[in-house]
Image (cartoon, rainbow, N blue to C red):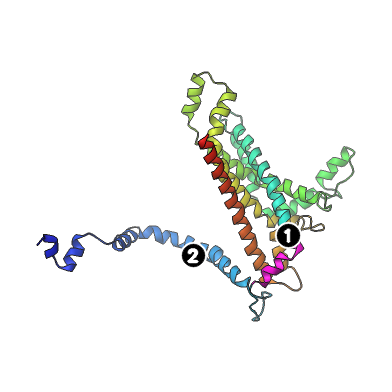
């Protein structure tokens, strides 16, 4: 009889070492202070992110105005209403157009500025970085209100300058042909500094040894840029673009304060339409607004998933070549 066989069951369990759940419990107890300090974040995240998401899924199945106890269950009727609502598709198209136009502009323009501001010998480089980042920390709603004054056709600074040049006043925010492009321009200006910070952080990951080696080998600035900088920054394009897409879809406050979705629904993004259906109508439809919110979340996940899939396919093809 072996020594292991002669032991009692309790002794054999002890000899075989601690169980996985025992090790996990000891690890949690050892790091208890870490979890204690994380607790406020977990509670706030659950209260303001997880719970609203779950409740929106539930409310989207109800015919509810947001007030009162009458909440008849209607199943997927709200989703059917959304699919048949031309304004919902209009708002989704406006949102997609903003993403298609502003994301490439922000990513490319911020990259150019980052390459320019990454030079430590540039005069006033810190002041310039701060100047580009100041709009990011400013409240978006306040910026929207200020922009209404700046683009005012009856005496705003922009039209006053155009008048001094002999140009007729332009109703930037009151015309359906210019309102959306004006909002997109303000959006790019407002958030350009954030994308700039992403690229500046990415540039810090490029080792200086590579530039020194290229300089020793006699490589010029053009060769160094396309041979070292661009290849080293390529992996960051995916994550920076994804972050920019998600940020662009959260454009509610800027559109709401600048145009309110008008004129003639030309700037009606989905977030504004959801707000209008839930709170800004004489007969609010909270259940319907929740259904549109769920659909917008699904669209966002599809965009992100498609982008990641295409990026992975492109990287595999590049690796094969």
Which stretch did the figure color magenta?
76-89
Q: Nearer the viewer, residue 247 or 99?
A: 99
Q: Which mark is residue 43?
A: 2
Can residue 72 be spotted in the picture?
A: yes
Residue located 52% across and 62% down the image: 45
Q: Residue 89 bears which disc, if any? A: 1
Q: Secondary structure at mark 1?
A: helix
227 left or right, relative to 152: left
Q: Earlier in the sequence, mark 1 or mark 2?
A: 2
How dense is the environment of label 2, judged by Cα within 10 Å: few (below 14), some, or many (20 and up)? few
**Residue 239: which quarter of the image?**
top right
Is any part of residue 124 visible from this angle? no
Between tags 1 and 2, which lies in front? Answer: 1
Residue drawn at (34%, 60%) of the image = 28
- Tell me residue 283's x, y (percent): 75, 74
Quadrant (top left, top right, bottom left, bottom right) of the N terminus: bottom left
- Around disc 1, counting alpha carbons within 10 Å, would you say few (fewer than 14), some (14 to 19), or many (20 or more)? some
> Image check: 126 left or right of 42?
right
Secondary structure of the residue carrying tag 2 is helix
Between 214 and 308, the residue placed more toward the observer is 308
- How far apart are the two marked residues, 1 and 2, measured between alpha carbons? 36 Å
Front-most of 269 and 281? Answer: 269
């Amino acid at each position: 009889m072996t020594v292991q066989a002669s032991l009692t069951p309790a002794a054999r369990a002890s000899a075989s070492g601690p169980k996985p759940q025992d090790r996990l419990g000891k690890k949690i107890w050892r790091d208890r202070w870490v979890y204690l300090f994380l607790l406020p974040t977990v509670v706030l995240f659950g209260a303001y992110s997880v719970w609203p998401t779950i409740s929106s899924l539930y409310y989207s199945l109800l015919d509810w105005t947001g007030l009162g106890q009458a909440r008849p269950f209607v199943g997927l009727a709200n989703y059917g209403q959304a699919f048949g609502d031309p304004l919902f598709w209009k708002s989704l198209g406006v949102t997609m157009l903003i993403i298609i136009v502003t994301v490439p502009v922000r990513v490319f323009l911020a990259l150019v500025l980052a390459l320019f501001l990454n030079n430590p010998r540039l005069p006033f480089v810190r002041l310039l970085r701060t100047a580009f980042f100041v709009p990011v920390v400013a409240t978006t709603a306040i910026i929207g209100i200020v922009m209404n004054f700046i683009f005012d056709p009856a005496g705003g600074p922009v039209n006053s300058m155009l008048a001094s040049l002999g140009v007729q006043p332009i109703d930037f925010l009151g015309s359906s042909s210019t309102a959306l492009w004006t909002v997109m321009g303000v959006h790019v200006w407002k958030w350009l500094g954030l994308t700039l910070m992403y690229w500046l952080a990415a540039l810090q990951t490029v080792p200086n040894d590579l530039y020194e080696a290229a300089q020793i080998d006699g490589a010029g600035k053009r060769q160094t840029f396309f041979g070292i900088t661009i290849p080293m920054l390529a992996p960051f394009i995916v994550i920076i673009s994804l972050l920019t897409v998600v940020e662009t879809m959260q454009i509610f406050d800027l559109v709401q304060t600048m145009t309110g979705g008008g004129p003639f629904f030309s700037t009606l993004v989905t977030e504004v339409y959801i707000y209008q259906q839930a709170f800004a109508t004489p007969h609010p439809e909270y259940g319907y607004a929740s259904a549109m919110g769920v659909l917008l979340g699904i669209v966002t996940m599809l965009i992100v998933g498609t982008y990641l899939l295409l990026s992975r396919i492109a990287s595999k093809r590049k690796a094969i070549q």
